[in-house]
């Protein structure tokens, strides 16, 4: 058996949209019966790239989250379809039959990830096919993976212990895009943006100098982490949980200790933390 | 019918083109045989770095099929309805009136008889013409090829290009370290290896390589930066915009007020001097004039020490941050990333931008430029790359049908009259005009000092303008003046030849449809410009020369440029003179034969297979850029055009003294009293910045860097798939708008929200954009890319009409870098922004 998957490393993605564009080039105006019908000009994004901006000036962050069909092992679109219009291949790829699916708009709405698109002209639901027609022809990777310059997209067989993807999946902690949907998606992620807290330490009696090497601790949410400020007096804790209360405490020799509590409704910039002499 | 696969190349990567029934169905990054790749390996800290066997092209290349079939293609020869060459010409209606389709024969008749009429009436110098940049690839059909050959035959008045993307480096840095043969940008050999092995920090100053991609080399270098990030090399981004490279690399973002980068640089020098943190031995042996520069930094000459606190006042960057950066830079092996091909950011395109570029060289000079990890490196070139095998490129004289020795006959243009691109409208509307500088001054420093006057004595004013392409509304400065120029009766005839409708196309009397490089035969090496950027393909992981096969017949009634000029030459009775007796394919073969490629592959195999990869050989020897200079040796890099290489001065730089010049000998000789580009660099307050009087009326600084998802004006509106990329354009009410990015603080004050249509304006014009409220832009700055291809004035043909296409260049000033520096300054531009209620 094989289980084809794309492992997406958000930390590597530079937001170039090569994946989106190469996917469109493969499918726009091109029918691949019986795999898929042509992608229309507008409103279909089989590979979306979602920009996520976090934090505030002057410490913003930006991530790009490439988002194809998740090729779920418990796929709601399959359950919602009639006449076997949506099916899973033996290699795990979830396919929509462009003939059988005519008129079945319910398939679009069944997908919690919103990656199935309605073709109003042809009256069919459409989505990423993992480039099944090319894989069956002997291509090694789908178009989006081929075009990705950063290595953010890795394609392969999770059931093949020698594949790059299964080795990688063992090395890193993979996640699902929306675990709450409980669909057992085959497409996996690394580095999905969480919450972060950032700040800059400043000595009240010496504002002309940065405060490097100052110990900063973060507690809360079952965590207890430590960091030191960099040459600019900046510190950051990444990968925090959402809507969780944390405490950041700062201890610098000769200065009064400082601490604050905050909740990660969004990303938090504590700004300039001014330390007073003891 | 079965599918056929052709090879071709674009300005950002090689492609395989799939054709079925005469129609292109797909385009992939060129699919080469695996055995053709012999990846290089760089060893650093016990790890081996090697590129994958594939070509990482730029995003828009994946949409080239869409561009090929764009609705914006010019399909037939067209004539403006109210243009009558024998009666009323109605030049005032250029840009307003519609067009009518005419036959090729009629079009060629009109154009050729206008050429004859104008040259007989006024002399050849009354004919001028110019191209836009790099809309296609392949040396035979390149803009410097057929166009230049034909125009030289006509003995036309050439328009000199300003070095638009790297002004400060061209006019400033050259007087500090030479490299005029690279137009002010330093050699980049083996700097990837140097960075991987030695760099501890990289300061990307006004440089966004994930957007500008080393000009032509697609996204090959994106992986290199991943490697550096994974190695833990600290990255610092100095840019008013938290750019795309900063987004993926993270690191420290420092956002100075625009136009104050030189102040920041001075303060860094101040910290180094006062804290004794610079390479004194290097400064003593490898530089001159430090003793003239130092007193200025310390404030001994003007009473103002250039302290970090002073720089904070100017730039808004905290003094402590400047201090920390300066100390770390001195303590750690730090690469300065900026100022190399593709990395010449907006800080050099401002008032007195020369001073910033000079300071970049001098700062690195104070830290031992050329020593391990102490380079000036854009991060987009300098992979191990073959330099032994020569293949002509477009900027080589030997790579153009106009000038190559492969021709039996070369037309020579004896006409000495010139015009300056930036002031062409002024030249037409209000002559005379004058300036210093011979365009791209790649032969000598003195070329920058040549004085020109238009009209030249004994020459005519321009009456006929042959425009090839047409992007300037979006790329030059204060661009509504181009509309006024086109509508002047002084231009008796305007013809425009292009593949797509562009911002200037509809300013012409006759429009000629050209075909793309997919519809004709050609040859080209990926990423190679040759000439002033010799060995640019070291920005690619593999050198690849592509036989650009004709994938389909020219569509509609379009023709290749070569054919159009052949037909025109025929009408003028000069066909043989133009073609040299060769077809396009014969030129391809002639260029192939003139190169080193026949040593590696036969013509037959190359022609059939469609490409050849030139791998490095086993005894490849790394010669990191400027290491020779730092170590006091003769130049050992393969920098072909370095005139001192191989001479007894081979250890010298290209400056008068052969050293890095804190006090410039060349400027001292020509302009000893120039206060705007002084002998030693200075921070000079911008003539359009936060100190200006109009700052009260127009308190926002417009930042318009090179765009990420188009190449100048190419692709963009000719490639509507890109409209689905919200970083590029955003659709609203059925229209794809150009984004203008604004900080929430500035947006709130004006009641602006993301998705609002906004008007950016000043006394020079107004442009409608869509607002993107973002934390990634500094307070007081509006970020909106230059190079919108869509010029869409609400009232067509009215030069002061608001443009809703996004040509923010309309807002930028005509004023040049400084009085003796005729460079453009789009990033010295004050505007106001408001919600547009229609
Ligand atoms: S796998 Fe194929 S169909 Fe799916 S997003 Fe990638 S290119 Fe598109
Ligand atoms: S191609 Fe790769 S780097 Fe580019 S947007 Fe897609 S995943 Fe990201």
Image (cartoon, rainbow, N blue to C red):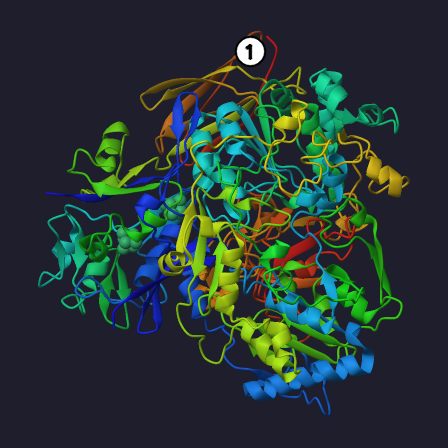
Q: Is residue B36 above or below residue A38?
A: above
| Chain for numbered disc 1 | A
- Nearest the camera: B730 or B25? B25
At x 66% / y 32%, what residue is drawn? B317
Q: Which of the image's four quarters has the C terminus of chain B?
A: bottom right
Name the side, left or right, on which A137 lies relative to B242. left
Quadrant where the N terminus of chain B is found in the figure? bottom left
Query: Does the image show residue B651?
Result: yes
Which residue is identified by label 1?
Answer: A256
Residue furthest to the right in view is: B673
Indicate the position of residue B707 as horizontal and vertical percent values. 55, 53
Query: How far from the left and from the top, in percent, is residue A193?
Result: 38, 37
* Residue B723 horizontal side relative to residue B428, left or right: left
Left or right of residue B582, residue B446 in this image = right
Q: What element carries label 1?
A: loop
Q: Is residue B56 visible?
A: no
Residue for point 55% across, 85% down: B104
**Toward the viewer: A79 or B39?**
B39
Q: Residue at x 82, y 31 (%)?
A: B663
Please tell me how crowded label 1 is: few (under 14), some (14-19), or many (20+) other residues with Cα within 10 Å.
few
């Amino acid at each position: 058996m094989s289980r084809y998957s794309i492992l997406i490393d958000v930390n590597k993605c530079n937001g170039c949209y090569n994946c989106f564009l190469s996917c469109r080039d493969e499918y726009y105006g091109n029918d691949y019966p019986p795999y898929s019908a042509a992608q229309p000009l507008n409103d279909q994004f089989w590979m979306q790239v979602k920009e996520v901006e976090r934090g505030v000036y002057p410490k913003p962050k930006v991530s790009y989250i490439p988002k194809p069909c998740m090729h779920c092992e418990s796929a709601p679109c399959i359950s919602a379809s009639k006449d076997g219009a949506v099916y899973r291949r033996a290699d795990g790829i979830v396919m929509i039959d462009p003939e059988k699916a005519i008129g079945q708009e319910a398939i679009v709405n069944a997908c919690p990830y919103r990656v199935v698109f309605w073709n109003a002209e042809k009256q069919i639901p459409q989505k990423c096919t993992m480039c099944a027609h090319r894989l069956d022809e002997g291509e090694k990777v789908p178009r989006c993976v081929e075009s990705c310059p950063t290595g953010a997209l890795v394609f392969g067989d999770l059931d093949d212990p020698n594949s790059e993807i299964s080795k990688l999946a063992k090395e890193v902690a993979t996640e699902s895009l929306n675990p709450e949907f409980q669909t057992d998606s085959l497409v996996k992620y690394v580095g999905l943006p969480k919450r972060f807290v950032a700040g800059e330490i400043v000595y009240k009696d010496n504002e002309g100098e940065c405060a490097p090497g100052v110990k900063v601790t973060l507690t809360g949410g079952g965590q207890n982490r430590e960091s030191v400020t960099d040459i600019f007096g900046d510190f950051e804790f990444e990968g925090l949980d959402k809507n969780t209360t944390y405490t950041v405490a700062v201890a610098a020799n000769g200065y009064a200790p400082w601490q604050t509590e905050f909740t990660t409704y969004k990303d938090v910039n504590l700004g300039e933390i001014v330390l007073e002499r003891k | 019918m079965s599918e056929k696969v052709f090879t071709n190349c674009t300005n950002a990567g090689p492609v395989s083109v799939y054709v079925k029934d005469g129609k292109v169905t797909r385009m992939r990054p060129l699919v080469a045989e695996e055995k053709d790749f012999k990846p290089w390996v760089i060893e650093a800290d016990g790890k081996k770095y090697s590129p994958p066997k594939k070509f990482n092209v730029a995003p828009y290349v994946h949409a080239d099929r869409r561009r090929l079939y764009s609705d914006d293609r010019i399909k037939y020869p067209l004539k403006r309805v109210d243009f009558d060459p024998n009666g009323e010409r109605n030049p005032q209606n250029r840009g307003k009136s519609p067009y009518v389709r005419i036959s090729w024969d009629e079009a060629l008749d009109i154009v050729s008889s206008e050429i004859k009429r104008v040259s007989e009436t006024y002399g050849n110098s009354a004919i001028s013409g110019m191209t836009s940049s790099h809309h296609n690839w392949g040396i035979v059909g390149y803009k410097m090829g057929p166009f230049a050959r034909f125009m030289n035959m006509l003995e036309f008045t050439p328009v000199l290009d300003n070095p638009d993307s790297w002004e400060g480096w061209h006019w400033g840095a050259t007087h500090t370290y030479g490299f005029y043969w690279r137009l002010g940008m330093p050699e980049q050999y083996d700097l990837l290896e140097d960075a991987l092995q030695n760099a501890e920090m990289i300061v990307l100053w006004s440089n966004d390589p994930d957007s500008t991609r080393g000009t032509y080399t697609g996204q090959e270098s994106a992986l290199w930066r991943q490697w550096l990030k994974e190695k833990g090399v600290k990255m610092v981004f100095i840019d008013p915009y938290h750019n795309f490279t900063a987004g993926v690399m993270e690191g420290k973002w420092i956002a100075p007020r625009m136009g104050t980068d030189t102040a920041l640089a001075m303060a860094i020098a101040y910290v180094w001097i006062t804290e004794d943190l610079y390479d004194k031995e290097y400064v003593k042996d490898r530089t001159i004039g430090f003793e003239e520069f130092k007193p200025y930094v310390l404030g001994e000459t003007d009473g103002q020490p250039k302290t970090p606190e002073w720089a904070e006042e100017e730039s808004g960057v905290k003094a402590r941050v400047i201090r920390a950066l300066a100390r770390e830079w001195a303590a750690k092996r730090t690469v300065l990333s900026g100022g190399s091909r593709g990395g010449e950011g907006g800080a050099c395109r401002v008032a007195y931008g020369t001073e910033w570029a000079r300071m970049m060289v001098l700062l690195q000079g104070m830290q031992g430029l050329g020593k391990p990890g102490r380079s000036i490196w854009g991060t987009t070139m300098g992979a191990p790359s073959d330099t032994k095998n020569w293949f002509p490129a477009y900027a080589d004289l030997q790579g153009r049908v106009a000038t190559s020795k492969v021709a039996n006959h070369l037309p020579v243009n004896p006409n000495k009259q010139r015009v300056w691109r930036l002031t062409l409208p002024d030249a037409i509307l209000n002559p005379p005009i004058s300036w210093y500088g011979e365009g791209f001054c790649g032969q000598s420093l003195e070329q920058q000092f040549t004085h020109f006057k238009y009209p030249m004595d004994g020459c005519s004013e321009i009456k006929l303008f042959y425009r090839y392409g047409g992007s300037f509304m979006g790329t030059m400065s204060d661009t509504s003046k181009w509309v006024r120029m086109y509508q002047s009766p002084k231009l008796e005839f305007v013809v425009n030849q292009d593949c797509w409708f562009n911002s200037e196309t509809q300013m012409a009397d006759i429009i000629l449809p050209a075909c793309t490089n997919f519809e004709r035969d050609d040859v080209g090496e990926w990423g190679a410009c040759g000439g002033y950027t010799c060995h640019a393909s070291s920005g690619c992981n593999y050198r690849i020369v592509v036989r650009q096969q004709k994938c389909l017949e020219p569509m509609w009634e379009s023709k290749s440029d070569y054919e159009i000029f052949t037909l025109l030459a025929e009408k003028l009775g000069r066909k043989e003179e133009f073609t040299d007796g060769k077809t396009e394919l014969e030129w391809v073969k002639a260029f192939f034969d003139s190169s080193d490629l026949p040593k590696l592959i036969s013509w037959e195999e190359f022609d059939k297979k469609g490409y050849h990869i030139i791998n490095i050989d086993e005894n490849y020897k790394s010669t990191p850029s400027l290491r020779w200079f730092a170590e006091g040796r003769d130049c050992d890099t393969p920098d072909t055009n370095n005139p001192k290489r191989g001479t007894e001065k081979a250890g010298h730089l290209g400056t008068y003294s052969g050293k890095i010049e804190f006090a410039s000998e060349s400027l001292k000789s020509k302009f000893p009293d120039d206060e705007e580009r002084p002998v030693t660099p200075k921070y000079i307050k911008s003539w359009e910045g936060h100190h200006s009087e109009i700052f009260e009326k127009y308190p926002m600084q417009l930042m318009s860097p090179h765009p990420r998802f188009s190449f100048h004006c190419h692709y963009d509106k000719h490639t509507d798939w890109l409209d689905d990329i919200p970083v590029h354009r955003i659709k609203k009410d059925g229209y794809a708008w150009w984004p203008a990015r604004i900080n929430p603080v500035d947006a709130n004050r004006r009641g602006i929200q993301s998705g609002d249509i906004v008007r950016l304006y000043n006394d020079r014009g107004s442009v409608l954009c869509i607002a993107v409220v973002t934390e990634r832009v500094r307070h007081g700055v509006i970020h909106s890319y230059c190079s919108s291809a869509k010029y869409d004035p609400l009232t067509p043909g009215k030069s002061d009409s608001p443009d809703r296409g996004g040509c923010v260049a309309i807002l930028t000033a005509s004023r040049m870098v400084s009085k003796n520096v005729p460079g453009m300054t789009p990033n010295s531009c004050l505007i106001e922004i408001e919600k547009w209620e229609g």
